Amino acid sequence: MAVNLSAHCAPPFNTFPHRRSPIAFTIRASFSRSICFTQAPTLRIVSVHSQKPGSDSSAIMSDTGAPLRPSSSSTSSAIDFLTLCHRLKTTKRKGWINHGIQGPESIADHMYRMALMALIAGDLPGVNRERCIKIAIVHDIAEAIVGDITPSDGVPKEEKSRREQAALTEMCKILGGGMRADEIQELWREYENNASLEANLVKDFDKVEMILQALEYEIEHGKVLDEFFLSTAGKFQTEIGKSWAAEINSRRNSQLAEKPN
């Protein structure tokens, strides 16, 4: 969620603001290499099983507490992958939490409406609609492991991308590798690098969905969420993105005009 909010800034993985006992968050599947994410104890980690450093029993855990054990069976691997993706349904988008929104949308909620945007958008020359839908579905998928990293966390863009790429690699290994895992990696990189017309459009949908959600929360909760609109102003790349954003802003201006002083 690309909004510059003034809140607690998370340190890099290997930096701690205090010398208290750190907790190591290790993600491991049935292969030799593991990735260790280390954070200060006060940082919110979403749905990751924690162990103290030196423990040999850490693993990716399902929301029920059962370890995910990748199998050579494609069926078993698919269910392990989908079980991990359940976190996308339960992890709430941090920008709304930081603004005090009660019961905010999840990461999966956000991606689903982006996919709907790709489905209903008018045809554009040279743009593959099916690919847009796929990119929308996978663009935040690594957040099943790393959580929703926002600018308020103080994580540099390059470090955020590195963490998400590492998490995505682990997720694709849980899936069992192969053609579908390769496709997920390719779609994610295409979006991350803004490397195609489809990626341009889905990047716009990401911002459009956010400001539409902001407008809905303003109406529902009686808040003024200017930061979300200011952070996206002038950053739309496509005509569809620009026109949809203009419509949302127009509706917002009408809502604000109707508010009593």
Image: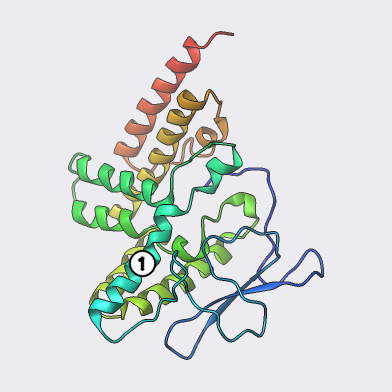
| Residue at (55, 8) in percent of width and height | 260
**Is residue 140 in view from this perspective?**
no
| Residue at (56, 30) in percent of width and height | 226
- Residue 237 point in image, percent of width and height: 38, 44
Q: Please say which color scheme the image uses.
A: rainbow
Q: Looking at the rendering, which quadrant does residue 38 occupy?
A: bottom right
| Residue at (50, 16) in percent of width and height | 256
| Residue at (41, 76) in percent of width and height | 68
- Residue 164 point in image, percent of width and height: 48, 66
Q: Nearer the viewer, residue 102 or 179?
A: 102
- Residue 18 point in image, percent of width and height: 81, 65
**Is residue 180 in view from this perspective?**
yes
Pointer 1: what residue?
Answer: 83
Most distant residue in the bottom direction: 32
Q: Secondary structure at mark 1?
A: helix
Quadrant in which the C terminus is drawn: top right
- Residue 207 point in image, percent of width and height: 42, 42
Relative height, residue 110 to residue 49 (above, below): above
Most distant residue in the right direction: 19
Q: Residues within 10 Å of mark 1 (few under 14, many from 20)?
A: some
Relative height, residue 21 to residue 187 (above, below): below
Q: Is residue 198 left or right of residue 46?
A: left
Q: Amino acid at mark 1?
A: Thr
Q: How many labels sit on residues?
A: 1
Relative height, residue 14 to residue 240 (above, below): below
Q: Nearer the viewer, residue 259 or 123?
A: 259
